[in-house]
Image (cartoon, grey):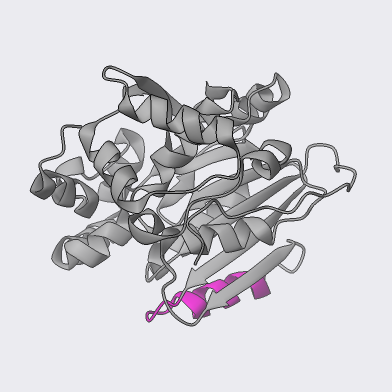
């Protein structure tokens, strides 16, 4: 496996006005991917395609996805079924590579996201139309020692000397900050993707660390990252709950059977806390500073 960025091949295809490729990655979260897919169909009113990537699920996910496809013959759906869990970066990259070359906009959409409003895409698309390369829930965050250590241990290589030097300078400068996008749902300009490359897939970047490296890469290359909040609900790291806190996942499923509890979760936002995230638990164990 390469230790450089995965590549999205360039395309000369003419863009279909307003068309969006929505890439949904799933692993063992059948009840949530069902909600995610149904919410996309219910609230998306512009040209779009769905690319649904299942990362070797052992639960009922594939049956749920097949049921969804049969129920929506008018929706353009591309399915990618991996036999094993390829982890986040390779799974999502496979979906992005399968996206239609005539769709200017590519949406990264996790299986623990539920669309809440018909205008969920509008602010992100408007930001890209104004010149941003990435749009989503974003804020400026400090570079931390955990990120520096991961970068040194995994030593990505870039074919661009300016990018190599810029990434090194950003990571090694004390007090440096960068625009971070929360990865549950965001939109990218396909042309920027073709230039910047996709997620890193090797070493520790295969699962938890590919997001911040990606946003730093866009930032160093001079692309704008816009804060444009999508109109969605994020259930919060369902795959991490399944992996690290299966008992809490079972409790959540039971609570969702209660209509009042479900309505409260959807109205209040995230029902879970960062301390319940496996990523956060691992970071604390390593003594990360951010």
Q: From the viewer's perspective, is 80 left or right of 32? A: right
In-front residue for pair 254/274: 274
User: Can residue 176 be spotted in the picture?
Assistant: yes
In-front residue for pair 41/193: 193
Instruction: Please state the horizontal and vertical placement of residue 59, each as a whole percent of the image.
Output: 37, 79
User: Can residue 67 be spotted in the picture?
Assistant: no
Magenta span: predominant SS is helix
Instruction: Please state the horizontal and vertical placement of residue 132, each as a whole percent of the image.
Output: 63, 24
Q: From the viewer's perspective, is 26 left or right of 95? A: left
Q: From the viewer's perspective, is 287 left or right of 2? A: left
Which stretch is magenta? 56-71
Rendered view: 105 above or below 229: below
Q: Residue at x 21, y 50 (%)?
A: 277
Q: Residue at x 31, y 45 (%)?
A: 152
User: Quarter-wise, where is residue 6 in the image?
Assistant: bottom right
Query: Is residue 211 one of those drawn in magenta?
Result: no
Q: From the viewer's perspective, is 269 left or right of 116? A: left
Rendered view: 25 above or below 57: above
Instruction: Please state the horizontal and vertical placement of residue 264, each as a whole percent of the image.
Output: 28, 41
Instruction: Please state the horizontal and vertical placement of residue 259, each as a whole percent of the image.
Output: 31, 53
Q: Residue at x 61, y 46 (%)?
A: 197
Q: Residue at x 42, y 40 (%)?
A: 213
Query: Is residue 59 one of those drawn in magenta?
Result: yes
User: Quarter-wise, where is residue 88 in the image?
Assistant: bottom left
Rendered view: 107 above or below 71: above
């Amino acid at each position: 496996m390469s230790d450089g960025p995965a590549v999205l091949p360039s395309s000369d295809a003419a863009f279909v006005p307003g068309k969006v490729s929505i890439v949904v990655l799933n692993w063992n979260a059948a009840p949530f991917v069902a909600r995610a897919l149904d919410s996309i169909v219910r609230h998306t009113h512009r040209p779009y395609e769905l690319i649904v990537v299942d990362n070797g699920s052992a639960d009922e996910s594939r049956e749920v996805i097949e049921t969804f496809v049969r129920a929506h013959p008018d929706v353009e759906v591309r399915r990618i079924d991996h036999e094993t869990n390829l982890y986040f970066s390779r799974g999502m990259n496979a979906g992005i590579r399968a996206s239609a070359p005539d769709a200017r906009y590519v949406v990264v959409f996790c299986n623990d996201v539920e669309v809440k409003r018909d205008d969920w895409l509008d602010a992100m698309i408007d930001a890209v139309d104004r010149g941003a390369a990435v749009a989503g829930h974003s804020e400026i965050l400090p570079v931390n020692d955990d990120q520096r250590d991961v970068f040194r241990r995994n030593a990505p290589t870039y074919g661009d000397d300016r990018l190599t030097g810029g990434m090194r300078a950003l990571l090694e400068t004390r007090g440096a900050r960068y625009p971070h996008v929360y990865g549950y749902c965001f939109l990218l300009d396909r042309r920027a993707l073709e230039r910047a490359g996709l997620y890193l897939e090797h070493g520790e970047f295969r699962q938890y660390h590919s997001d911040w490296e990606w946003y730093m890469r866009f930032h160093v290359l001079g692309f704008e990252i816009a804060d444009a909040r999508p109109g969605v609900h994020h259930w919060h790291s369902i795959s991490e709950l399944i992996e690290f806190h299966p008992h809490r996942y079972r409790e959540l499923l039971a609570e969702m059977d209660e209509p009042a509890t479900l309505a409260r979760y959807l109205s209040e936002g995230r029902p879970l806390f960062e301390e319940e995230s496996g990523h956060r638990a691992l970071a604390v164990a390593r003594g990360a500073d951010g």
